[in-house]
Image (cartoon, grey):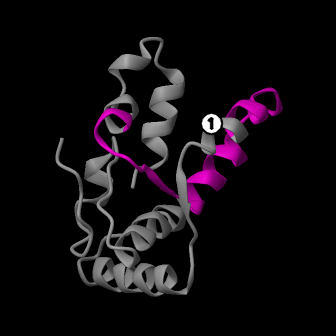
Amino acid sequence: MIDTTILIDYFRKSEKANSKLVLHFKHFDYIYISSITQFEILNGAPKAQMQFWDNFLEKFTIISFDSQAAKSAARIVAQLKSKRKTIDKPDLFIPGTAVAHGLTLDTLNMKHFEDIESLKLLNS
C-alpha cells in the first residue's frame, strides 16, 4: 500500500520516471491505496485537477477504511500513547488499513510511521 506522499510526489515531479510510484508500477501487479488517501487527494485537489485525479486513482486498488481497519487504528493509538507519541488521525487510518489487510506501507515520510510496531514499512 502506498500513502498520499507518494502520489503527491509523482504529481509534482517533472521527471515522473524518477518517482517511487513509477517503481511500484514496474515491480507490482497491484498497487493499493487506502480510501483515506483517496479522500486526502480529492479533498486537497483544486477543481481544475479533479478530472485528472478521478482518472488517475482508477489505476489503484482502493482499500476501504472498514471495521477491521478501525480496530487496527485504535490499537495503534493505544500503542503510540503508551510511548507518549501521537500522529494525526488521518495518518492513523492509513496504517490501520494496511495492518488490517496485511499490507506493507510505503511512504516518503518513514519517520512519521516508524513508531507503529504492528506496521510493516517498505524499506527502500
Residue farthest to the right, as pictured: 47
Say which quadrant the N terminus sits in: bottom left
Q: Which residue is mark 1?
A: 56
Rendered location of residue 8, percent (x, y): 51, 34
Within 10 angstroms of label 1, few (less than 14), some, or many (20 or more) residues? few
For the point 61% across and 52% down, which residue is it? 38
Instruction: Give residue 108's quadrant in the image.
Output: top left
Residue 87 position by quadrant: bottom left
Q: Is residue 69 magenta?
A: no
Furthest-top residue in this view: 14
Give the mark count. Answer: 1
8 vs 43: above or below: above
Question: Is 30 colored magenta in this rendering?
Answer: yes
Q: What's under tag 1, amino acid-wise?
A: Phe
User: Dominant secondary structure of the magenta stretch?
Assistant: helix
- For the C terminus, the image quarter is top left
- Given residues 64 and 8, the one toward you in this image is 64
User: x, y percentage for residue 96?
Assistant: 42, 73
Please provide the residue range marked out in magenta. 25-53
Q: Quadrant of residue 84?
A: bottom left
Q: Nearer the viewer, residue 59 or 67?
A: 59
Q: Is residue 15 above or below residue 27?
A: above
Q: Nearer the viewer, residue 20 or 27?
A: 27
Q: Position of residue 74 (x, y in %)?
A: 44, 85
Residue beneath the point at 39% across and 66% down: 95
The answer to whether residue 11 is left or right of residue 45 is: left
Q: Secondary structure at mark 1?
A: helix
